[in-house]
Image (cartoon, coloured by chain):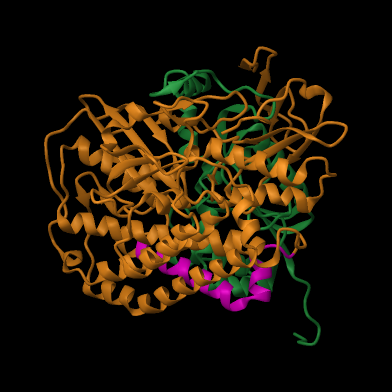
Chain colours: A green, B orange
Amino acid sequence: MNDAVPEKKLKLATAALCGCFGCHMSLLDIDERILKLVELVEFDRTPLTDIKAVGNCDIGLIEGGVANTENVEVLRDFRRHCKILVAFGACAVNGCIPAMRNQFDLQDCLQEVYLDGIGVENPHIPDDPEIPLLLDKVHPVHEVVKIDYFLPGCPPSADTIWIFLNKLIAGEAITFPYSLIHYD
Amino acid sequence: MSSELETTQNPERLKRVVIEPLTRVEGHGKVTLLQDENQHIKQARLHITEFRGFEKFIQGRPYWELPVLVQRLCGICPVSHHLAAAKACDMIVGVTELSPTAEKIRRLMHFGQMLQSHALHFFHLCSPDLLFGFDDDIRHRNIVGVIEDHPEIAKQGVMLRKYGQEVIHVTAGKRIHGTGAIPGGVNKSLSNDEIKYLKRDIDQVIDWAQGAVELIKLIFFEHYDYHLSFATIDSNMLSLVRNDGAFEIYHGGLRAKDVNGNTIFDHVDCNRYGEYIREGVKNWSYMKFPFITSIGQDDGWYRVGPLARVNNCDFFTTPLAEKEREEFIGIGGGQPVQSTLAFHWARLIELLHCTEAIAELLDDSDLYGKALLNKGELQSSGIGVIEAPRGTLFHQYEINDDGLVEKANLIVSTTNNNQAMNESIRKVANQYLDGNQLTEALLNQVEVAIRAYDPCLSCATHAMGKMPLQINLVNEKDELLDCLEKRVTGDINRTV
C-alpha cells in the first residue's frame, strides 16, 4: 500500500428501528477503538451525527425490528442507499423482545396502555397523523428488504462488532473466534 | 406555566416544519412546528413515536423474568430497569431488606451505570453543541469533530464511559443487559481480582470527572446570561431523597418542590406513588404526560433528572460533589435553578459524585460477602422506584397465584419530562424562531433544548414526508405481508 495516497474512507450509516438502542451502545463499547474506527470510516446518518437523511453509503447497520410505518420507510431508504446492509443485533434478526407483542392483538396492547392502565387520566388512544401507524406485528428486517449480513446477540458484543467491521472493511471473509459466537 | 403553542386552532392553513429524526439523543423523536405566513410560530410539539406495549406483552410471564426482560426497554440505561424491576421483585418474594452485600453490589452497579450514561450524554452527544456552538457546520458538529479538534476531551469522555461500563460488567456479567440482580438479592459478589481491577483506575477517573465539571462551568459562565435564559422554564421538581435529605439514587422517599422551592410533598413512601402522580394522554404523542395529582394536569407537571435531583437534595455525601453542589445552588440565589442548560452542569456534578461513591464502595469489605440472597413469603404485588440517569423511574407489577404477571405499570424517566420538554421547545420557538426564516442552525436550537434533558426515546423512528393513510408492507417479491389503514375516526384497522 502506498502511504502517500490516502485511501478514500468508506461511509458508514446506522439506524435504530424498534429496539432498545443497546446495539448502538455496544458499538460505542469498542471504547477507545472508536479513535481508530473514525480513521477507517466516515459516519453518514447515524444517531451520533446531525445528518438527517441517509446518503450513498458502503455499509448500513440496522438495529431493531420493523414495528411501524416509519420503520418500513427508513429501512427501505437504507436499502436503497447502502451497498451492504446488516441486520445488527437480535431485534433486527428476529424481532426479539418487541416481537413478544405479536402474540397479542395490537388493539389490546394499545387499550392496556392508554385506556385500562394504572393511573391514566383522560384515557384515549393517540391517533394524530404526526405519529406513525403501528404494524399489526413486529417483523425482522429481512422480511422487508434484502439483508447481506446478520449479526446476532442482545446486543452483539463490542468485540464481535469490532471484528466484523474490520474484516468487512478489509474485504476479508467474516469469521469469529468460538467464544464470540453466541446469542445472548 | 403556560401551554400556549401546544395546539393551534386551524393547523391546515399553516406551514409545517418538521425536525426528524431528532439526532444526538438516545432513541428517536420528532418535532413539528407550524408557522403562519408571517413566520410566527403557532404550534410546537415534541412527538414521541415510540410504542412497544411492554405493559401488555409481559402479562403471563413469570415474575422472575422481569429484571432481564424489562431491561430490554432501554440499552442505554438497562441497569435502571434491571434494578427497578429487581426491587419490585424483592417485594414480590417478600424480602424487605437485602443482605448488605447484595445491596452494595446493586448500588455499585447503579453508580457505574449513572457514570457511563452521563459521560455518554455529555461527551458523545452534547459536547459538540457546547464546544463548537449551536450553529457549527452540520458535518462537523458531532463526536468525530470533537475527536479531531479536542482529542484529549474526547478521549476522557470515552474512558469515563468505559469505566462505568466496566463497573457494570464486573457486577452484572455483561456491559449491556446483564443479569446481576435477582429477586431477593444478587447472583454474585466481587472477587479480589475484580476489585483490584476497578481500583486500578479510579483515581484517574475521579480526576477526569473533576475536569468535566470544570469544563462545563467554563462553558456556562462564558455565556452566563444566555445559559440562564435559553429554553428556561419554571417548573416543579421531583426526585428521590434519602431519609436525611441526602442525594440518593437507589432507594429513598419522593420529594417534590414547587417553582419557588417550597415543598409540595416530602419523604413519600414510593409504594404510594400512585396517590401522588397520575398520567394524562394526548392524542399526538405515544408518550403520556404525568402530573402531580394534587395540583392537576395543567400546572402539576414537573421535571426530573439531574437538575431536579441536585436542586431537591439537601447535600451530597461525598466532598467534591457537595462542594460543586453549593456553587451550583448559589446561582439560584435561594430559588431552584430553573435554567434548562444547567441540566448539563448538574449532570456532571452527579457524574463526579458517582466516581467518588464508587471509590468509597470499593473499600467496603461487604463487596466480597457471601450472603447474596434473602427469602420470604410470595406477595401478589411489587413496586420498584429508582433514580435512573434521566430521572425517577417507576415499575409496578401484580402477579397471580402461579407467579405470572397480570398487570404492570411503567413510568419511565423521560416520560416525566414530557411536558417540560414541550414547554422548553415552545420557549425556544418564542425566543429565537418566531418571525424568522427557519434555518438549520435555528432548528438545531430546538434540539439543543431537548438534548439538555437527555431524553431516552429509544425505539421509534420517523417517516420522511407525510404520513400515509394506508400502509402496505410487502417483501422484496412484492407479496403483501401486512396492510393497515387509519380511518377518519382515528381507528386503526388491519385490512388483510
Front residue of this view, candidates B72 and B3: B3
Report whether residue B393 is seen.
Answer: yes
Spot occupied by residue B417 in the image (x, y as percentages of width and height): 51, 40
Q: What quarter of the picture does the C terminus of chain B occupy? A: top right
The residue sitting at the right extreme is B37
Which residue reaches farthest top? B489
The vertical placement of B234 against A153, above or below, is: above
| Residue B162 is inside the magenta segment | yes
**Residue B174: image x %, image y %?**
38, 59
Q: Along the horizontal axis of the image, is A121 left or right of A67?
A: left
Q: Quadrant of residue B216?
A: bottom right
- Residue occupying the far front of the picture: B333
What secondary structure predominates along the stretch shown in magenta?
Answer: helix
Q: Is residue B384 left or right of residue B335?
A: left
Judge from the rendering whether residue B445 lies leftward or rightward of residue B360; answer left or right.
right
Which quarter of the rendering shows the N terminus of chain B? top right
Left or right: B59 in relation to A96? left
- At 68% from the left and 43% from the top, the residue drawn is A75
Tell me which residue sits at (53%, 32%) in the image. Answer: B287
In this rendering, does residue B166 appear at all?
A: no
The image position of residue B393, as x and y in percent, is: 39, 42
**In this rendering, is residue B127 above or below A22?**
below
Is B375 contained in the magenta span? no
Q: How many marks?
A: 0
Q: Nearer the viewer, residue B182 or A122?
A: A122
Q: Residue at x 49, y 54 (%)?
A: B332
Percent position of residue A16, x then y: 60, 47
The stretch in magenta equals B140-168
Q: Quadrant of residue B255?
A: top left
The residue nearer to you, when weighing A17 against B352, is B352
